[in-house]
Image (tube, rainbow, N blue to C red):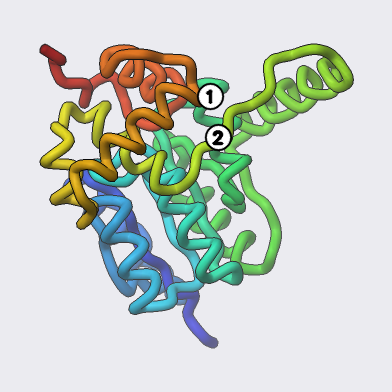
Amino acid sequence: MNSITVLLAEDHTIVREGFRKMLELEDDLQVVGEAQDGRQAVALVKKLRPAVVLMDIAMPLLNGLEATRQVLKAFPATKVLILSAHSDDAYVKNAAESGAAGFLLKQTSAQDVCRAIREVQKGKMFFSSSISKRLDRLHRLSSDRAGGLGRKAVRLTSREMEVLQLIAEGKSNKEIATELGIGAKTVEKHRDHLMHKLDIHDAAGLTRHAISAGIIESSVQLTIV
């Protein structure tokens, strides 16, 4: 029997080790790599080509949602299962829009995590029960608003999402430029585009937006001078 290869993307070492030990007990599941942030996860998917990625949402440098989009754009056959300690509407909505095959709360039992990996590897979807209920409610709300004059959703590019997260993590333009390998002037242009698109005009506002959208958790917010 061929094993299902799995990549673990989680920034907390103790949590990642727990998932690894749990999956190692299953004969048909094989952990082939571990990532500490979204950018490393994308790089390891390109290198290892795992069948399934367990992807935490709140990770430094590149969050799990944007990492999922980048992974699926490059390798659409890869299945991504989102992991989160939160089930806020913003998290669920953004995870669904990222193209993930499922969403698991970190409180999910080991049995269900393993079952979810097997199900998505077969091409099915898998959600924690509370997440399924939220998706149903969000779908109904979306249908009710169809044809109305609701505010149009703002679409950010992958680079803009990366810059937004790094701004929200308290990094300066120079630090962002170094992290992304681009010029400081280019970072400034991305910052201006973000403020224009989101109608937000300061770094504190961008940080609040990143938190409300589930791009970062409030616990990683840094003080902005």
Q: Secondary structure at mark 2?
A: helix
Residue 213 % position (x, y): 46, 24
Seen as rendered, the residue at the extreme bottom is: 1
Name the residue beneath numbered marker 2.
Answer: 94
Q: Can you say whether 41 is above or below 161 in the image?
A: below
Position in image of residue 45 (x %, y %) = 39, 70
Residue at image position (31%, 46%) is 62
Q: Name the spot of residue 12 as percent of width and height, x first.
A: 20, 44
Q: Does residue 120 appear in the picture of this structure?
A: yes
Residue 90's tag is 1
Q: Quadrant of residue 123?
A: bottom right
Left-right relation of 24 to 6: left
Relative to 26, is 47 on the left or the right? left
Q: Position of residue 195 (x, y in %)?
A: 40, 22
At label 1, counting other C-alpha atoms closer than 10 Å, the crowd grade (few under 14, some 14-19, many 20 or more) is some
Residues at marks 1 and 2 touching, judged by CB atoms closer than 8 Å: yes
